[in-house]
Image (cartoon, rainbow, N blue to C red):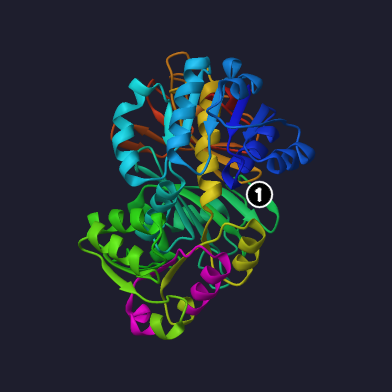
Amino acid sequence: MKVVIVGIGKVGESLATRLLKEKHDVIVVDEDYQTVEDIVNKSDVKGVVGTCLDRAILTDAEVDTADCFFACTLRDELNILSAVLAKKMGAKRVVARVRDPQYLSSLESLKDELGVDMFFNPEYRTAMEIAQVLKFPSAISADAFASGRVTLTEFRITENSPIRNMSVMEAARTAGGRMLFAVVQRNNQVVIPSGDFVLEAGDLVHIAAEEKDLLELSKKINVFKQRAKSVIIVGGGRIAYYLAKKLLAEGVKVKIIEINEERCRELDEALDKATVICADGTEPSVLEEEGVKSADAFVALTGVDEENAVISLFASSLGDIKVVTKISSAPLAKMVLKLGLDSVIAPREIVIDQLIRFVRAQQSEDAEGINALYRIHDKAEAIEFTVQPDFPGLNIPLKSLKLKKNVLLCGVVRGEEFILPSGDTSLAVHDRVLVVTGVKQVTELDQILK
């Protein structure tokens, strides 16, 4: 596919890199000559220098024949206008980044009139990801699929874990049986395990199940924590706003510590039920005074990765508290994980997964077939599909289907019913299916079959 990206900041460059790995033709546009030259020199992309509101520039970027157009500049207005212009010039699908909460709420209802296929908001997506983790604080990460009916949750097997040295089949039986061990990460290896795969201390396991069964599992492996009812957030940016709004709507007590007085006033006006403290949240004395020890969860959302890492380590040292840390730098994230901070959130990776899902959907014959995509690791993905009428495996028991190697069906949602797949399970039209796969660039459910 031919993809045009305007605005080569962190999101634009990361998106270009992922798309190149998936063998797409990528053209980048940016007003800064050095930015374009740098990405062209290190990547196999075509670069165009100029404004994305200039028809001549967009013509040079071949927007008229583009399959997908992504507007990723730092200005919402520029993204909206360039996406509308690109659609009028002939781009098949156009996507615009919109970060301002006021714009986003209004624009969703105007998508059809504007001709924009999708708006995306990295801060909003990140906040929703953190909120999901706080719903299930026993886990390192938790991702909801099929409108929340299936959760893919990540745990670490410790030296004292009751399921250490058990086979996956034994572990599932011990935990109640209503779950599937979807992926195991061991050092740099990623395995989609068979039933006789034996779990070891240090393994990161991704388990698919309904939330109630995951709660039972966390109790049986001695990592259970109650859902967070009080949360302290350091940093009052857009992620903090979206997260606080979501948590408050769910009845969670929220305290935000922000150093900028003007931003504190804005948050205080926008979030009636939140407690907003104007102070330096990187100061240990401030964190102790504001009750980090007694909170259920602590979220570090300042604009500086190093600050987030240090205050998260401090918060975790104060007691048994769930700590979530925003880290944008991939190398720093790896270092932080080795220091014991498990729940590290990378906003850029979250939104790139969303955009790659959009591109994959456009490659499919039915763009409605692929609903969600989550990259577990470079070597494994979890993808939610809706079963289409032309799926060749309809109404055939899974034990009779020939699946490709490194493919596992982890859950089926039929209406409101969750089905844990067995050999006798068969798929029906409109079922939502969670597939974990090591097969690269899957765009349709058919591709899991041999």
> Compared to 114, does 344 lie above or below?
below
Give the position of the C terminus as an image quadrant.
Answer: top right
Q: Would you say residue 309 sits in the magenta stretch?
A: yes
Residue 200 in the figure: left or right of residue 371? right
Q: Residue at x 45, y 58 (%)?
A: 174
Asked whether residue 333 is in view, the answer is yes
- Which residue is tagged 1? 190
Label 1 CA crowd tier, 10 Å (few <14, some 14–19, many 20+):
some
Foreground pick, 183 / 284 = 284
Foreground pick, 287 / 389 = 287
The magenta-colored residue range is 288-314
Asked whether residue 193 is in view, the answer is no
Q: Residue at x 67, y 39 (%)?
A: 17
Q: Position of residue 264 (x, y in %)?
A: 32, 66
Question: Residue furthest toward the right?
Answer: 41
Residue 203 in the figure: left or right of residue 229? right
Q: Position of residue 105 (x, y in %)?
A: 30, 39
Q: Position of residue 9 (x, y in %)?
A: 60, 45
